[in-house]
Image (cartoon, rainbow, N blue to C red):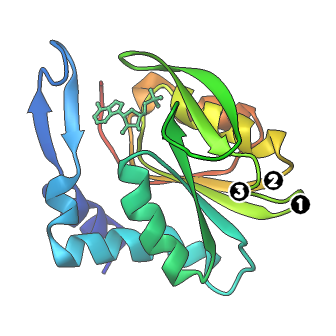
Amino acid sequence: MTPATLERSLLSAIRTIPDYPKPGILFRDITTLLGDARAFRRAVDELVHPWAGAKIDKIAGIEARGFILGGAIAHQLSAGFIPIRKKGKLPHETVRVAYSLEYGIDEMEMHKDAVKPGEKVILVDDLIATGGTAEGAVKLLRQMGAEVVTACFVIDLPDLGGRAKLEALGVDVRTLVAFEGH
Ligand code: AMP
């Protein structure tokens, strides 16, 4: 499959919901992609591809859609999985960071013992918009000494500048499809 065909097939598997969760937002809904066996497999295979054979210790997934993609990627790369969650959901000792969203502000947490210093980690979420969420996750991982080797997303909203924000932090970014605007 050529990159253009792959991109078209992934784009057609993503549903757009206007004005969700608030007016003016075009919500890029990947539940349709996840429900399509071939599209789901292709997305995971493409995200994993550059790292096949590499020694990756952990995949960190951002709640909640990053858990689904991240779990599949962790399995493919024989890596462990780290959940990065909204505050108050993790039962053990955590590190916490505040972050800004395309539509609000929140806090996220990770277990303190989820990663050891020097471990190589891939960060995963479904979509990067302003990059505030992923930036917060990178901060948590680096605070505990992890090396964030890449951050990968199915969808990029390049007009919102998230990729550039992460790259300015020295994080390699990989995305599969892009939508103009927000
Ligand atoms: P941001 O922190 O601005 O990069 O926002 C990324 C996070 O918010 C991801 O966890 C996305 O799932 C979610 N998100 C932001 N904008 C959208 C959108 N337009 N459609 C779907 N999810 C979004």
* Residue drawn at the location 57% of the way across and 21% of the way down: 99
Give residue 92's position: percent from left, percent from top: 65, 47
Task: Check the image and report above or below for 146 versus 58.
Answer: above
Where ligand 1 lies, by quadrant?
top left
Can residue 131 be seen by looking at this rendering? no
Mark carried by residue 146: 2
Can residue 42 be seen by looking at this rendering? yes
Of marks 3 and 2, which one's residue comes earlier in the chain? 3
Instruction: Report the label total.
Output: 3
Q: Are marks 2 and 1 in contact (CB under 8 Å)?
A: yes
Secondary structure beneath label 1:
loop
Amino acid residing under circle 3:
Ala
Q: Quadrant of the N terminus?
A: bottom left
Give residue 13's position: percent from left, percent from top: 15, 59
Amino acid residing under circle 1:
Gly
Question: Neighbour class for label 2 at 10 Å: few (<14), some, many (≥20)?
Answer: many
- Between the C-alphas of marks 3 and 2, the distance is 10 Å
Amino acid residing under circle 2:
Ala
Task: Check the image and report above or below for 129 versus 11.
Answer: above
Which residue in the structure is indicated by mark 3?
A: 114
Q: Quadrant of the C terminus?
A: top left
* Residue drawn at the location 76% of the way across and 58% of the way down: 115
**In front: mark 3 or mark 1?**
3
Which residue in the structure is indicated by mark 1?
A: 118
Question: Neighbour class for label 3 at 10 Å: few (<14), some, many (≥20)?
Answer: some
Location of residue 19 by image quarter: top left
